[in-house]
């Protein structure tokens, strides 16, 4: 289609307004929110806080993506399964000690015979089928 032939607008070189950068939430807000969250959402928010992962990255996190990176640390290698993969980029995230410790419980409870997503929210009984 002809839309595919259009080039992207170069940053700061057109009349198009630039959006403000997205800033992280302050720690007090995160701590206050954690008090109201159940698992696995609590763990998901904590992993995002300690690693800077995007929400979709935390949701797609699998055992098979994790590798040891020294004492009390892991790497999360998303390979070509992330939002910039279409540009040929690879995404690797270092999980610091705090994030690694938070993930120990989901890792220990994971069933190796089932799909290896670590943080899967349980479906509500009254939720409509997918």
Image (cartoon, rainbow, N blue to C red):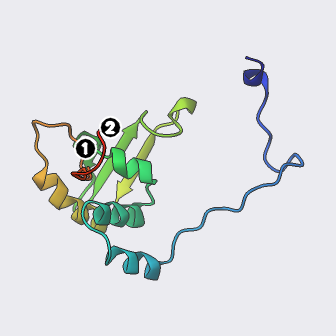
Which corner quadrant holds the C terminus?
A: top left
Q: Residue at x 46, y 39 (%)?
A: 82
C-alpha distance separating marks 2 and 1: 18 Å
Please identify the quarter of the rendering in which residue 35 is found. bottom left
User: Where 84 falls versus 109 (above or below)?
Assistant: above
Secondary structure under badge 2? Answer: loop
Q: Is residue 83 left or right of residue 30?
A: right
Looking at the image, is mark 2 or mark 1 earlier in the sequence? 1
Query: Residue drawn 57% across and 32% down?
Result: 87
Q: Residue 102's spot in the image, x, y percent?
A: 24, 65
Q: Which residue is outermost to the top?
A: 1
Along the line of sight, the residue nearer the viewer: 68 or 33: 33
Q: Residue 5 got which mark?
A: none
Q: Quarter of the image containing the N terminus?
A: top right
Q: Is residue 26 above or below residue 110?
A: below
Residue 117's disc is 1
Q: Nearer the viewer, residue 55 or 84?
A: 55
In the rendered view, would you say 79 is above or below 1? below
Left or right side of 45 for 74: left
Residue drawn 53% across the image and 68% down it: 24
> Crowding at label 1, few (<14), some or many (≥20) Cα neighbours within 10 Å?
some
Q: Residue at coordinates 36% horizontally, 52% vertically from top-left?
A: 58
In this view of the protein, can residue 96 be seen by the observer?
no
From this view, report whether residue 86 is shown above or below residue 116: above
> Which of the pair 67/51 is nearer the observer?
51
Disc 1 on helix, strand or loop?
Answer: loop
Where residue 81 appears, x then y in whole percent? Answer: 41, 35
Question: Relative to residue 19, is residue 45 drawn left or right?
Answer: left
Residue 74 visible from this viewpoint: yes
Q: Position of residue 46 (x, y in %)?
A: 34, 66
Q: Residue tagged by mark 2?
A: 130
Residue 106 percent location from the top left of the image: 18, 56
């Amino acid at each position: 289609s002809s839309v595919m032939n259009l080039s992207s607008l170069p940053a700061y070189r057109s009349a198009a307004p630039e959006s403000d950068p997205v800033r992280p939430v302050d720690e007090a807000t995160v701590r206050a929110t954690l008090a109201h969250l159940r698992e696995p959402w609590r763990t998901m928010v904590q992993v995002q806080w300690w690693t800077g992962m995007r929400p979709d990255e935390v949701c797609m996190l699998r055992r098979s993506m994790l590798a040891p990176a020294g004492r009390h640390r892991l790497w999360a290698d998303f390979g070509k399964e992330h939002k910039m993969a279409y540009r040929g980029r690879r995404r690797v995230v270092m999980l610091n000690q705090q994030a690694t410790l938070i993930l120990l419980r989901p890792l220990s409870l994971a069933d190796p015979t089932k799909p290896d997503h670590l943080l899967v929210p349980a479906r509500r009984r009254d939720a409509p089928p997918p």
